[in-house]
Image (cartoon, rainbow, N blue to C red):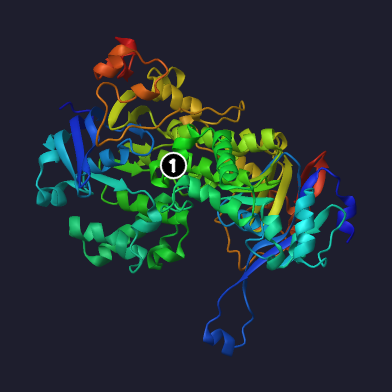
Amino acid sequence: MGNDVALDVQELKVYYYTYTGVVKAVEGVSFKLGKGETLGLAGESGCGKSTLGFSLMNLVPPPGKIAGGHIYIDGMDIATMPESELRKNVRWKKISMVFQGAMNALTPVYKIGEQLAEPLMIHKGLSKEEAMEEAKNILPKVGLDPAIVNRYPHELSGGMKQRVMIAMALILRPDIVIADEPTTALDVIVQAQILNLLKSLKNEFNISLILISHDLSIMAEVVEKLAIMYAGKMVEIGSSDEMFADPKHPYTQGLLKSIPKLTEKGLHYIPGQPPDLRNPPSGCRFADRCPFVFDKCRREEPPMLKVGDTQYAACWLYE
Amino acid sequence: MDYVEELDGDTILAARDLVKYFPIRRSVLDVIARRRQKFVRAVDHISFDIKRGTIFSLVGESGCGKTTTGMTLVRLYDPTSGHILFKVDDEDVRRRLKELSNGKIRFYGDYVNLSEIPSKWMKPLRTKLQIIFQDPYSSLNPAYRIRDILMEPLIIHDIGESPEERYDKILKALEAVKLVPAEDIANRFPHMLSGGQRQRVNIAKALLLNPSFVVADEPIAMIDVSLRAEVLLSLMDLKEKYGVSVLFITHDLTIAYNISDYIGVMYLGKLVELGTAEQIIKNPLHPYTQALVAAIPIPDPKRRHIIKDIRIKGEITSAVNIPPGCRFHPRCVAYDENPQVQERCRTEVPELIEVEKGHYVACHLY
């Protein structure tokens, strides 16, 4: 693994083994995250992006399981690491996560300071006093008054809770942070403030950041590299500049067109719906909704093909 | 009542000094200590007009009172005070109202005042006032097929002479929102439809009763971005093809810009700015509106090096302990920069004044 690669995901498969069938939520996804790079993982409900995010910490909730592939961080394969090893050395120390819906991720019965202190006490063996000091130090970095260590979550607003979650993800100075829909459920002004915060923190803490969201506008604001997921597959990846200027995969094109703009009025959508992942179609999963579909699309699944300097798209149009 | 004289025939609904307060439960201690009853002042004296065949978006962040306003306008909440003037053109509805109220209902020309109509007389008006809610997953009864869900309002309001005629109306309503083949969709259960399709069923349901005014409360917030336009286009059809006026409640200014004729911006229970969509987005006047517009994310990756300058301080304050004077002043950066108005901002509640034609703002800077 190169020295400038923070995360190397190879052919990752994550399946949910449910009563009604096996849901192939992530089917053979590969990508690399460079050190200090910000990658956006975009897609709509059910595309597998959150599942992918959880799998990077091997935290997929049952009945989900990593069914194949590798996740390399610092030469270690997270996908096959035993739980005890993950807890001791990986989770929160090397890679951490800011969860969706921060409102619900904080324990209501403990004060903020105690919740921030916990990872420090468990993973770094600090005493409670030392950990609380650390907690007070990190809060101003996320724009919060250190005095809130003595407050309970219900006394804070949604935006403030989200900032606490970000502080919690950074407190052990991990190399990689995954932010899963960090601004959904937040008002537009608070959203803009949190995005400003993420932008300044990624430089200050020198982290590699993965931002998961369905909102391509906020992706544009923050990420350098962008990956688009559809029905469990990665359909396009490339630099943010290239992807927005010249999207190659028909799904990416449709998605970008669907974003309402202030520069011109117009409403566009992609007709149809994503396929049922218990029974995915043979061939390209986007075929049914693709305006450019032809024979080969329904027979064979397209691999990632190079379509630009940094851009790859899984589409037979570019063979 | 003098409000009615100033209304032009084009106005379908007018809110005048509308107020909705929610009392906060008092503990035994509060009662014993004789503490004053506290209220959540969700909607605090707002006035605006909605013209026939237009889409009016009510925008603001959570807690500003926009949903409460929508619910109060269709009388799902009773207003605490104020007037809601609603134009009743339909002869049939007027007749039914007179019958139901034994002639006691008061008409102000073509208008009735929804605030003074008791619930027991509301039924004929309910066909004309409809609401579409945010959550497509909990707003349709999962135990009924779509056709039975759509039959219900027709049966309740005695529309249609026979089951066949009603079924025909249902199919037409489904076709109007492009849910085709209509017979197939009518036969399905809600879980067999996507979020966007379910929301269009809700629109079809509202359409069935031939309303003149529909409140749509964040109808696309829970739908994927690439599927939202499908629902929005159906809503716009309501206006364009059926002449229905829509109050569109949203926190998303970009959507508001793309579909509305008029936008009203709310903050902590008050209307702070009002104008056409073009005026509000391209020339926001109130400091709060300016902050909202500045915060809108733009899908242009070249801007990612820019740390946005959003001119607003602090957090939204409580709707129980409202700041005196202009309720926005504690967060207003313009307040800090303009010492000459600070006294007024702290003590006097600003009224909406017309700054350019049709563009109103409630701010002492003007």
Label 1: how many Cα within 10 Å (few below 14, some 14–19, many 20+): few
- Is residue B364 shown to the viewer in this render? no
At horizontal 75% and vertical 54% (from top left) the residue drawn is B93
Relative placement, left or right, of A278 versus A162 is left
Front residue (pair B94, A291): B94
**Can you say which quadrant of the picture contains the C terminus of chain A?**
top left
Residue B123 in percent (x, y) is at 68, 60
Out of A186 and B172, give the one closest to the viewer.
Answer: B172
Query: In the orientation shown, which residue stands out farthest toward the bottom?
Result: B32
Q: Residue at x 61, y 83 (%)?
A: B35
The image quadrant of residue A23 is top left
Residue depicted at 77% across the width and 47% down the height: B12
Q: Is residue A310 above or below residue B68?
A: above
> Label 1, on which residue?
B187
Q: Percent x, y for residue B361?
A: 75, 47
Q: Position of residue A242 (x, y in %)?
A: 41, 19
Side (left or right) of B275 relative to A195:
right
Does residue B353 appear in this view? Answer: yes
Reply above or below: B346 against B275: below
User: Type of residue at label 1?
Assistant: Asn
How many numbered badges does the structure rendering display?
1
Q: Nearer the viewer, residue B42 or A111?
A: B42
Give the x, y percent position of residue A89: 14, 48
From the viewer's perspective, tell me whether residue B255 is left or right of residue A110: right
The chain carrying label 1 is B
The quadrant of the picture occupied by the N terminus of chain A is top left
Q: Secondary structure at mark 1?
A: loop
Q: Quadrant of residue A69?
A: top left
